[in-house]
Each structure stands twice: as structure tokens, then as C-alpha cells.
Amino acid sequence: MLLQPQIEAAIQKDFNVFFMELLNESHMHAGPAAESHFKLTLVSDDFKGIGQVKRQQAVYRVLKELMPQFHALALHTYSFEEWEQVQKAPASPRCTGGH
């Protein structure tokens, strides 16, 4: 089974999701792995009043069994109120390593 839908299902199951976008950015990085680098934008009022570190820890807890299957996860977490202000996550930089 592909990894991306497993990540999405785990997030949907454990968070009250207003908006979620999981991008497979593996093509932007060196190496042959098709599902190695992801960017997750997650908007949930579960994050209201919680700092960035605690938000990331909550996401990592949910994904702990899947994390050994990928190399990197860029996290952009917002409460609904924060999301209304920004409306999009920052762009990901291109990989500078590899061949």
C-alpha cells in the first residue's frame, strides 16, 4: 500500500481536520525513493492555544508507526484562526544535496 494515503488516514483519524494537504515532494530530492519526502499542511482547531513544538509532537505521535518508512516530513500546522490569516503554507526549498 502506498504511504501517502496511510499518512492521510492516520491524520484524519486523530485530528479534527479543517484543511489538510499532504504533498509528496520526493521528486525534489536526491535518491530513488518515490515516497521519501512529504510536506504536510494541517489546519485544525486542535492546535488552538498550542505552540509549534507541541503541535509537531502531536503529529509525530500519530505517525510514529509510519515514520520509519519515510525520510522527511515538513510540517506546517495552523489553528483555523491562524489559517484565515495566512491561507497557505510556505513554499518548500529545492534540495541542495545529492548528485
Image: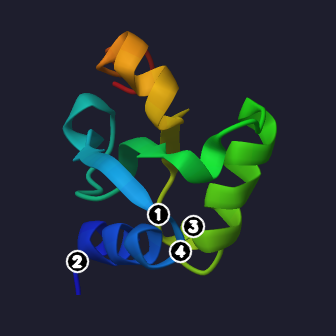
Q: How crowded is mark 4: few (under 14 residues within 10 Å), some or many (20 or more)?
A: some
Q: What residue type is labelled 4?
A: Asp
Q: Residues within 10 Å of mark 1 (few under 14, many from 20)?
A: some
Residue for badge 1: 16
Provide residue 7's location: percent of width, then percent of height. Answer: 39, 69
Q: Residue at x 46, y 63 (%)?
A: 16
Q: What residue type is labelled 1?
A: Asn
Instruction: Give how far apart the Cα atoms at labels 3 and 2 are.
Output: 13 Å
Instruction: Give how far apart the Cα atoms at labels 2 and 1 are.
Output: 23 Å
Instruction: Give how far apart the Cα atoms at labels 1 and 4 are.
Output: 7 Å
Instruction: Give how far apart the Cα atoms at labels 4 and 2 are.
Output: 20 Å
**Element type where label 2 sits in the image:** loop
**Mark 3 or 1 closer to N-term?**
1
> Residue 12 vs residue 59: left or right?
left
Q: Residue 91 appears in which quarter of the rendering?
A: top left
Residue for badge 4: 14
* Circles 3 and 2 in contact, beta carbons < 8 Å: no
- Quadrant assignment for the N terminus: bottom left
Residue 2: assigned label? 2
Q: Residue at x 34, y 77 (%)?
A: 9
The residue furthest bottom is: 1
Closer to the observer: label 3 or label 1? Answer: 1
- Nearest to the observer: residue 60 or residue 58: 58
